[in-house]
Amino acid sequence: MKKHIFIYLVLILIVIASIGMTGCSTRNMFMNPVDPTAINTNISEEEAAIVFFKPAARSDNIVSFVWKVEESGNLKFVTSAIPGVKTLHKTTPGRHLYLAGGYFMEAELEAGKTYYAYVVRKKTAMSLLVDAARFGVHTGSLVATIVSVGGVSPFLSTMMHSANLDPYILVPVSDISSEEFKKTFANTAWHENKTFSHNFEAERKSVEWRFSKQLKDISAIPPERKILMLPEYGTDIPIL
């Protein structure tokens, strides 16, 4: 009996260690750590900034991706979202639309202000698959996407292992003075996205296929699938 208990304990420790190693390897695969002093945190009056971050969680090593919806309806890659990581995104003041997992965030950004948004688990992947049926997916679009990413196998791999179907949502921070935010944000580290070989093009095409109806007509986004980042959420306080 004691021998069996010892074996079980060893197995548990191995699993815990592997989870931690997976998180580190995933982070290193997509991003590089950055010295905080090397980040240009100055926000000019012609800019607005959003700091995207994902709370550190040992039980969550899934990579999410944040996209910006262009006026053309196409998606532009913004950042990977990895537990324990934060990145700085500078853009122009005004209204912008972002997408992560299965949810949109409409941001109204004021000039010279900094905003914060974190990526958190919202729903199960299966529930998002069911919801996807409501998003106007067409057979022709599906076939075109499969061909564009190189066939059925890479398409299925992308769909099952990327953030296209993950249960995450972008949540804007309305009060950076809250203790919860300070504690969570302090437990993240600055990183920058690698620009090498990961196939973001396949990811983008797959997400554009899934949300083709909403990207062509943002009024088609269900209210429960869109979060608002209000202008007053911005701050003049230097980036933390």
Image (cartoon, grey):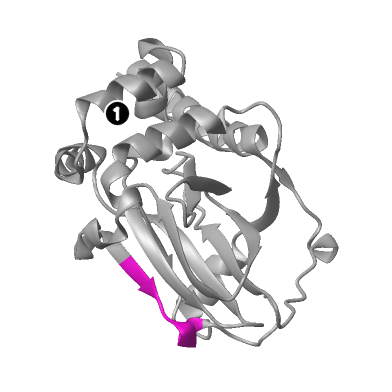
* Residue beneath the point at 67% across and 36% down: 28
Q: In which quarter of the image is residue 106?
A: bottom left
* Residue beneath the point at 42% across and 25% down: 158
Q: Does the magenta stretch include residue 100?
A: no
Quadrant for the N terminus in the image: top left
User: Against 112, is 221 above or below?
Assistant: above
Residue 224: % across, % down = 21, 63
Q: Is mark 1 on a helix, strand or loop?
A: helix
User: Against 139, is 186 above or below?
Assistant: below
Looking at the picture, which amino acid does disc 1 mark?
Ser
Left or right of 107: which side holds 240? right
Q: What stretch is highlighted in magenta?
A: 227-233
Residue 81: % across, % down = 52, 49
Quadrant for the C terminus in the image: bottom right
Per the image, the residue denoted by label 1 is 141
Residue 205: % across, % down = 44, 33
Counting other residues with Cα less than 10 Å from the Cα at mark 1, is it few (<14), some (14-19), or many (20 or more)? few
Residue 86: % across, % down = 61, 58
Residue 158 visible in rendering: yes
The residue closer to the viewer here, 183 or 167, is: 167
Number of on-image labels: 1
Q: Is residue 231 magenta?
A: yes
